[in-house]
Image (cartoon, rainbow, N blue to C red):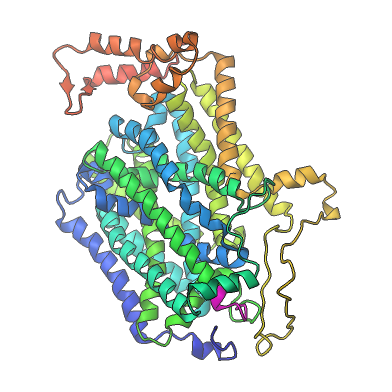
């Protein structure tokens, strides 16, 4: 099965100069895409609308490819197979969330953002609530963006440097510098077309690894037999204990909340959908994105299953070949292709591609938030000046994200869990506050702000308590290690008939009730779900206590197209005050102010003269009470 672990690590993991050439060509081509978009493309990035949205003239297919490759980062490429290798294949269920997620975001969030013609999605929160809610959400989003980018840079750099002769510092700097260069220089067009190229490399890499590994271990039938011997034949865990990390309920409920945030109210993804030529194109690109994410996660999970079968005789960590199991995917690549010059470099390029795509998209999204939410509203610069400032901001964001990569090890050794935990902590409150705005016309800014803060506090409670008061994992499995005696100093073979599931044991040093420790260790997959629900509940209650808004005073375009259908299912008394009244007074006022100086856009929306537009923004954020 596995390669002889007794070989010298220095001789085993040396990359050939051909591998370096292949990796270098991939990086060089990504940079050339940025140079071309900056110097020769269309408007040559002279306006922020061109730089950040491509003048809304991009095709749906490349945008959709960019969406899915931006979501599928190196954290997924490395962490997903490692998770399956360590804890069994139950995490594959996350690939089934795509249909539900696509249906939700294409019927709710995308139509609202596209029709409002926003660049930063947080502009919506000021239109619906006020500037305080908007700026608070932007700050949370920017912080989460930097933290996640640091994981995406650090994870592949550590994994690759630990099993090759590439240094950690060089790997971090190369990943950070390349994506910062082409994303800040070429804007969203460079990011999207580089993503298309990188997606081809990444998906091809996963497919080649999966097929080659399956052949090496003797086919699918042998893999299934080895999974049974290794007690990893459980593909579904229906346990209702919320501390089970990857139960069916945690993945299918909590995972949907996280994915809806990622694809529906995340600047990194929504900004790409908004760059399409039409709303139909944005919807199509969103579907491509969620389907691509689902299929790629399924491929990554399958790679994890094949890796277990390949290393079933001797776990590489127990053998001392690698330090942590997060490094097993790069090791697997080298073991499969290390003897073929250039091929291991090509597959390792897939890991770099997954990292570059997400970081470049993150740099572009964070720079859009800072430019549109902080710079433009407060400084009256020319369009050319704002565009230049935005490019400089993108460069600075790339430097910051690269620097923070050195802090990423402080958040734990399991990169998939640590990254998704941070996403869950911050995704729930943001998803909740957008849901309050789009689905509940009576919610006011006080309620929105209270819900946002409450959700963030609960999220950080989960995050901090899970680090400070951890319980033993309930799904940690053992390894067979039949042939590790030659390379392990302290070898102990596990019986195949033994149950490998570890039961939680209360540490008496905590001196805390068990129920509280279980609350602190709820599955990280639930973080986004629980924090989102708390945000919505608190927002509703506070809005009712402080005086709900009058739905008639609000622009109907601020609400999800399904809101009418939702309220029409309620009793008639609620329908009269909610469904039929939304936007009624607002539309009447618009008609009164619009004389000869109005424009009717192709989509039928009225563009008001500037004074009237400003007036209605101020009016609808003044919260007319019932």
Give percent across and percent down for residue 181: 31, 61
Give above or below for 70 relative to 263: below
Side of 191 relative to 436 (left or right): left
Q: Residue at x 59, y 21 (%)?
A: 541
Instruction: Decide which of 59, 49 is in the foreground and name it.
Output: 59
Q: Is residue 391 visible?
A: yes
Give above or below for 533 relative to 197: above
Magenta part of the chain: 309-316
Give percent across and percent down for residue 183: 31, 56
Instruction: Decide which of 112, 132 is in the foreground and name it.
Output: 112
Magenta stretch, overall SS: loop
Q: Is residue 372 magenta?
A: no
Q: Is residue 393 visible?
A: no
Q: Quadrant of the N terminus?
A: bottom right
Q: Is residue 315 magenta?
A: yes
Give percent across and percent down for residue 574: 48, 12
Give above or below for 589 relative to 470: above
Instruction: Decide which of 579, 176 is in the foreground and name it.
Output: 579
């Amino acid at each position: 099965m596995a390669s002889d672990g007794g070989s010298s690590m220095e001789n085993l993991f040396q990359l050939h100069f051909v591998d370096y050439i292949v990796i270098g060509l991939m990086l060089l081509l990504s940079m050339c895409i940025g140079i071309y978009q900056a110097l020769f493309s269309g408007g040559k990035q002279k306006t922020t609308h061109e730089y950040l949205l491509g003048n809304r003239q991009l095709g749906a297919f490349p945008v959709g490819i960019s969406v899915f490759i931006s979501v599928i980062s190196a954290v997924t490429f490395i962490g997903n197979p490692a998770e399956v290798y360590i804890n069994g294949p139950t995490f594959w269920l996350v690939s089934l969330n795509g249909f539900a997620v696509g249906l939700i975001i294409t019927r709710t969030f995308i139509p609202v953002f596209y029709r409002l013609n926003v660049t930063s999605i947080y502009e919506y929160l000021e239109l619906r609530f006020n500037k305080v809610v908007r700026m608070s959400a932007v700050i949370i989003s920017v912080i989460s963006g930097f933290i996640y980018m640091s994981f995406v840079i650090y994870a592949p750099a550590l994994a690759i440097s630990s099993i090759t002769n590439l240094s950690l510092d060089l790997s971090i700097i190369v990943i950070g510098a390349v994506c910062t260069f082409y994303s800040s220089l070429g804007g969203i067009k460079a990011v999207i077309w580089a993503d298309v190229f990188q997606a081809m490399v990444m998906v091809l890499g996963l497919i080649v690894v999966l097929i080659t590994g399956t052949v090496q271990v003797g086919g699918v039938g042998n893999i299934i037999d080895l999974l049974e011997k290794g007690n990893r034949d459980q593909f579904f865990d229906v346990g209702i204990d919320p501390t089970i990390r990857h139960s069916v309920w945690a993945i299918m409920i909590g995972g949907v909340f996280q994915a809806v945030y990622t694809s529906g109210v995340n600047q990194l993804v929504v900004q790409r959908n908004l760059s399409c030529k039409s709303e139909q194109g944005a919807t199509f690109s969103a579907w491509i994105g969620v389907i691509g994410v689902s299929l790629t996660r399924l491929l990554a999970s399958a790679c994890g299953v094949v890796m277990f079968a390949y290393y079933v005789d001797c776990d590489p960590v127990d053998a001392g070949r690698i330090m942590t199991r997060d490094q097993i995917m790069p090791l697997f690549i080298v073991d499969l292709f290390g003897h073929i010059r250039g091929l291991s470099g090509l597959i390792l390029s897939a890991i770099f591609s997954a990292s570059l795509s997400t970081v470049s998209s993150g740099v572009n999204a964070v720079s859009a938030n800072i430019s549109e939410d902080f710079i433009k509203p407060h400084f009256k610069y020319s369009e050319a000046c704002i565009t230049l400032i935005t490019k400089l901001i993108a460069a600075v964001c790339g430097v910051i994200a690269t620097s923070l990569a050195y802090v990423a090890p402080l958040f734990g050794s399991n990169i998939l869990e640590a990254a998704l935990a941070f996403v869950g902590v911050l995704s729930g409150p943001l998803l909740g506050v957008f849901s309050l705005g789009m689905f509940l016309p009576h919610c006011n800014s006080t309620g929105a702000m209270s819900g946002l803060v409450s959700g963030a506090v609960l999220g950080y409670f989960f995050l901090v308590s899970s680090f400070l008061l951890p319980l033993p994992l309930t799904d940690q499995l053992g390894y067979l290690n039949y042939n590790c005696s030659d390379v392990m100093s302290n070898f102990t073979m596990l019986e195949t008939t033994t149950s490998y599931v570890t039961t939680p044991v209360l540490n008496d040093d905590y001196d805390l009730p068990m129920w509280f420790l279980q609350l602190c260790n709820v599955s990280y997959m639930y973080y986004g779900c629980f924090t989102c629900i708390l945000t919505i509940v608190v927002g509703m209650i506070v809005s009712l206590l402080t005086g709900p808004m009058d739905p008639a005073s609000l622009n109907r375009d601020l609400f999800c197209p399904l809101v009418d259908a939702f309220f029409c299912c309620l009793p008639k008394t609620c329908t009269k005050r909610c469904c039929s009244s939304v936007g009624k007074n607002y539309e009447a006022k618009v008609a009164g102010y619009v004389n000869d100086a109005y424009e009717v856009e192709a989509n039928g929306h009225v563009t008001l003269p500037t004074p009237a537009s400003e007036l209605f923004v101020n009016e609808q954020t003044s919260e007319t009470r019932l």
